[in-house]
Image (cartoon, rainbow, N blue to C red):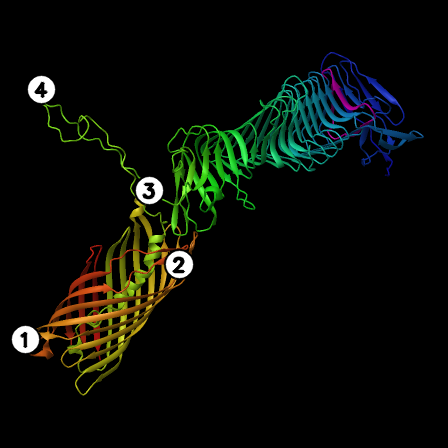
Amino acid sequence: MSFVNMKLNPLSIMIAKAIPAITFVTAVGYNSIAQAFVLPSTAETISTNIDLNMYNAIIPSGETLIIAVGANHNALTANNGYRIYETTPGTLSGIYTNSGYGINANTGGNVTFNGDLIITSGVTTTNSNGLITSASPSGDSGSAILADGLNSSVLLGKGATITSYGSSSSAVIASNGGDVALKGNATIQSDGISLWAHDTGKITLDNNVSTVSTSGSVIDVQTGAIVSVTGGSMSTQGIDANAVNVDGTNSHVKLTGVSLETQGQGSKALVISNNGTIDVINGSVNTKVGDLTSTVALFNDSGAVKSGTLNVSQSNLNTSGTHGIYAEEGSWTVNLDNSSTLSAAQNAIYLSGATGPSVVNFSATNQSVINGNLMVDPANAASRLQMTMDQSMLTGMAEGNIDLTANNASRWNMTESSQINQLALLNSSVHFAAPVANRYKVLTINNLSGNGTFYINTELNEGGANTHSDLIHVTGNASGNHLLNINITANNRTQTVDDGIKVVQIDGSSLNTKLFALDNEVSIGAFDYYLFEGSKDGADTNDWYLRNEAPPVVTPPVTPPVTPDPPTGTTPESDGSSGSGSNVTNPLPKPAPAPTPYRKEVPGYIAGPYVNMLYGYQTVGTLHERMGDTQQFARGYDDKTWGRYGGQHLESKAGRFNYDIDIMFAQFGRDLYQSETAAGTLITSGATVTLGRTQTDTRDKGRAYVGDSIHTGGITTNAYSLGGYYTRYAQDGGYIDAVTQFTYYDNHYNSRYDADQKSYGLILSLEGGKPYGVTDNWKIEPQGQIVYQLLKAEDFSDKISNIYGDSHNTGLARAGVRFFRDQVEDKDNEIFKPYLTLDAVSSLTKAPSVNVGGTNVRADFDSSWWQGGAGITANAAKNTSFYLDVKYLKSFEGDLDGYSAHLGVQGRF
């Protein structure tokens, strides 16, 4: 370290009387001590030319220093009501002292400087030939600033660099009502305590202060003193160097916008005892070294008043040590507010009962967050954590005598099994962490109340001894209305047996018959699970179970009419029954058989292939639906181009499943080949293109059994087809029509969980008919048709399970008659050809079954129906015809009915 000799200008300091008393100022040159005695009505200017080398500071030439040489000498002292201030701000550059005070204001004295100032205590100077040549730390207990006594004050209005050397030193001291204020940017470093206020002293740092204590505390407040710091950073570097100590009633530290940090082993950031208070606002508190004792906030008591308060707002408290908040014997209050965070490597809050009962009232409000466990030492039964959360979140486990109240969308993320005394929820939730290595969690509560939601993890299996699920265990009483949201962790497609899967155990009384209900629909494979209170045998009435069966519905007992008393003197005839005819209540009837609890998506999945096949049948249709009665009109033309639009609406009651099905399509065709045999038989073949869409609404009446809506969703299918036809018209009017068509189906299932499926269909139809005359202009035509259809459905899945597609082979047979007008005379001018139809139709196979999550499910669609309709073909011009038909159908079983319509146009060239 090197120093430079500098010539400094004279010092100009005004000493003014504040109260009638005499004071003295100690001004020290390079080799002597000069004392200036000031009369009450005068002022004196102290001027000394000083050449010196100065430790740890470069003093520009032309500036002024005050140096106190020797033990226990103060550099600058104002007492007895006198005031020291600069006549010209910035005149004084530095104040240095050995074991005394740099600035000492006592007994009502005041010191004010408004320029940048360096104050250093605990240094020793050396001189040679009247010149100070060096300065170095002395290791003594000097302090930079002291304000001692009522109305004593030190005000530094601009920048300040304050250093105190020596482990017993303090940078700034305010005591006995003294007041120190640093208004400008300040840098404070101390080997001991940076800011020490005691006995109602007050220290205020108002603007971006950087404070470092190498071995002691940054702030130490005792016996009613106050320290307020705004902005900047503070840190301790020593071992067991607590950053902030507050002790005593009315002792108060307020940190606003401050970053506080401890870097030494065993150092605590905040220590409160004997009814002290700490406020942390818009700042951060961190302990950097993790060990068993390093904490963000420690409540420690060594006095008679065993209490204290910590208020945290818009701030973060973090520790890499074991405990975030450690509380010993006493009654303590902690308030986290306005998005504050408390985080610890292990325990966010730990209550020790080693020396006596520890009681902590803890509140977290307005989006505050607690990360870490809650632990109450069982060594003292009177220790208790009373914790209230309001719009806040806790992540960690809890163990011990803890009363937890969670309000207004608060959330507890429970990371491990926990045991607490009381849990009261008000529109809040508890989220069980996902199991690790198949280890599920148990929340044990003495008493449960309020209304909240528990998010638990459950493997859906047979239950019983093989239950793998989180558990809510209430050892005392339970009240309120709570919801269970089940997260399915595994699905082995096994239905529950006996009581099923236990998710809630209540050892005491259940004070509400609707204590728990499911918050979400729980499903695996094809089935829903429901929540049941009590075991099947009735021995256990309070526990709650998941079972994949519908809860029983019991019809209320029926009270029969009261038999009136007979008239006096008349004995009613006996009907042979026992009893007196009084008001007797019949016993409860047996529960109605419960329907299979299929999940909400099943009605759609099992109808998808059936609806695809209906679409195939509808678009192939019959010859007269496709082409109209245009055979006579088309004679003599080689090419026909045609198009038609068709639609069908069906309502089906397929057992417990109901469907509304709408089919719409547009079909276009063109003859590619035409010929006529020697016998006059016309042969036509062509190709078709079809675009269509089906919309199906699905319902499950079985869901009404448990009070759920029967509306389960829908199916939307877009279909794209290519086909061909081959038709022979005999001279006598008989015909044979063969049709083939390939269709691609894009199915979208809309329900609780949406899903998509691709299917492919191939259809072959063979139809024939021959007319017979009834009158000159009317004929009857028996018809027959057989249709084969192959549908290949792909596998797909939703969020619950896989749905396995399959190849479905079906057949359809139709027998019917057509009664139509066929004009005999002047056929070339025939314009209208009306007709009526009546058919019987039967499916040759059952509706396809669908495998949902390993279970085959089939809807019981009606397989046979009759249909009747009317149609007309109109010849609008020699080369243009229009045709229309409408039909109504109804199944013979009575559970299927609907109608269809087709409109087409044909052009001939």
Q: Nearer the viewer, mark 4 or mark 1?
A: 4
Marks 3 and 2 sit apart, C-alpha to C-alpha, by 28 Å
Which of the marked residues, 4 or 1, is nearer the chain's N terminus? 4
Q: Give the number of the disc on residue 706.
A: 3
Q: Position of residue 430 (x, y in %)?
A: 49, 37
Helix, strand or loop status at disc 3: helix
Mark 1: amino acid: Asp
Residue identifier under label 1: 776
Mark 3: amino acid: Val
Q: Is residue 107 magenta?
A: yes
Q: Is residue 285 above or below residue 822?
A: above
Q: Nearer the viewer, residue 347 or 110?
A: 347
Q: Nearer the viewer, mark 3 or mark 2?
A: 3
Residue identifier under label 4: 568
Give the crowd class for mark 1: few <14, some 14-19, many >=20 residues within 10 Å: few
Helix, strand or loop status at disc 2: strand
Marks 2 and 1 sit apart, C-alpha to C-alpha, by 56 Å
Seen at 39% across and 58% down, the residue is 756
